Amino acid sequence: MTRTRLRLVLAVAATLAVLGPLAWLWWQSLVPDPLSVMDMGYVDTGGAPLSAAGAATGGHSGHGEHLAHAEGAVSVADLTGPRTGTPDVAVDLVARAGTVRLASGREVRGFTLNGSSPGPEIRARVGDLVQVRVTNESVPDGMTLHWHGVDVPNAEDGVAGVTQDAVAVGDSHTYRFVAGQAGTYWYHSHQVSHEQVVGGLLGPLVVLPRRGVAQDVDALAVAHTYRGTRTLNGREGEVPVEALPGDRVRLRVVNTDNAAVRVWSDAPYRVLAVDGYDLHRPGEVDGKSLSVTAGARADLEVVLPGSGEPIRVQVGGSTALVVGAPAAPPPPVPDQPADTLDLLSYGEPAALPFDPTHPDRRFDYDIDRRPGFLDGRPGVWWTINGHLYPDVPMFAVEEGDVAVFRIRNRSGESHPMHLHGHHALVVSRDGVAATGSPWWVDSLDVLPGESYQIAFRADNPGIWMDHCHQLEHARDGMVAHLMYAGVTTPYVLGGPEDNTPE
Ligand code: C2O
Ligand code: CU
């Protein structure tokens, strides 16, 4: 071999040595189409074996199929709400792509339900059978409805490719569930949600107690940003809430955006509930703002003074609720307090329905980022326990388990983590135990560097998304699932319906 020849051979070999592994990594990262979540990543059983009924192995080799094809596996399609019975609340919705008209007359491109965004408020009482039939008139990618924060039976959860197929243009889908827990919720599409939710395919859902309400006035504040324009209930600026002197006013703040929103006021307020769960003996808050996590809800109470002097409650810097007489001139924008209310120590402790200190399973949900390929695209991508989507954990539980998640965020950005189908109790943050009211969440902001422990009872069989509600993060792979042993799904990601929940 001549010297030049040798050089060439060595150069080619060196190139292959670099490109070969890269090509392999690229190829490995391609997300199969279709993909069943049952075959996604690896099963993590949280440090305890699954019993024989759940079949299956733990550890990294255990693929979903072991769990899925176990004798007598239940399909998510069968985990429905009541199929018979006359609904107490029946709503028909029509989903369209096109123009959203804000109250100011401003028009933005987006999505509507029955011609508006937010879609109509659905209001039920505890125990009501709720039936919502949605027809997709013109959303080209298909759509679904997910009941964010409502722990519905799995088949009603509205996740394209996991609990149903996306509803194609011209098709309809009916959801039926019993409203079990009084509180403030919302619904939104869970198909291409980083476009459809951001574009306004959403609306509020309020569940009132079986009878009576404690407040004189009950008002919604659905925060949403339409292409850079911040709104409350589809309005820019100030939203009037009519109240009489001395009235107790419940303000239901729903954060449908991708980032947390601050709420504050010059008037004292109480936080009555978070994510549909009442706080126990919430004290008066003065001079502090409340951070409402992306996807989360907070119910605040303000009391209009005897003088009738209106109260202004800021929801972010540019939108506010003005509580008082209809024509009262709004008070000036109050300065945003430097302090934020810490829910970890707010309110008073109360009995818990289970013991979070002796869980049956413990899971880690470590969020980080690293360079790699995501579905063939090079970049610096989110990781879950060091893994890139779709090679992510399937967290496996059995019905009845108490499970603890330790969520650690070392990624340098905030992540509003949302577990479907369950509410979790916040146990501790950065090693500091919760000392206030039991704090139940379905959406929890985990800030850079923070570590939370949350606990929940596995009491709702199914396959449940457990993802970041910064929906661009979800699109970029911050998605995992909680699965119950013995439950399987016939739906697939991708496929002919092009199911794309993120
Ligand atoms: Cu608000 Cu998985 O969604
Ligand atoms: Cu995130």
Image: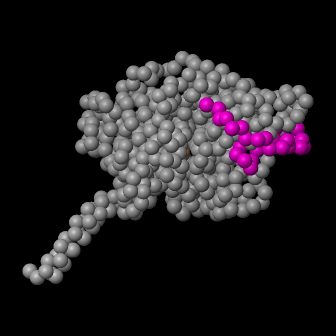
Residue 49: give x, y in percent of width and height: 28, 30
Q: Is residue 467 above or below residue 371?
A: above
Camera-side residue: 213 or 292?
Answer: 292
In the rendered image, residue 351 lying in the magenta stretch gets the answer no
Which quadrant is home to the N terminus? bottom left
Q: So how many labels did they put on this image?
A: 0
For the magenta stretch, what is the residue range?
A: 315-342
Residue sitting farthest toward the front:
3
Q: What residue sits 11% from the left and 82% below the top?
A: 2
Furthest-top residue in this view: 351
Residue 457 occupies quadrant: top left
The structure's colour scheme is one colour
Taking 55 as reference, is 258 above or below it? Answer: below
Task: Say whether residue 331 is left or right of residue 145.
Answer: right
Work out whether residue 400 can be spotted: no
Between residue 142 and residue 381, name the one nearer to us.
Answer: 381
Residue in the image at 19% along x and 71% along y: 13
Is residue 334 something one can see in this rendering?
yes
Residue 44 image offset from top left, x and y in percent: 33, 38
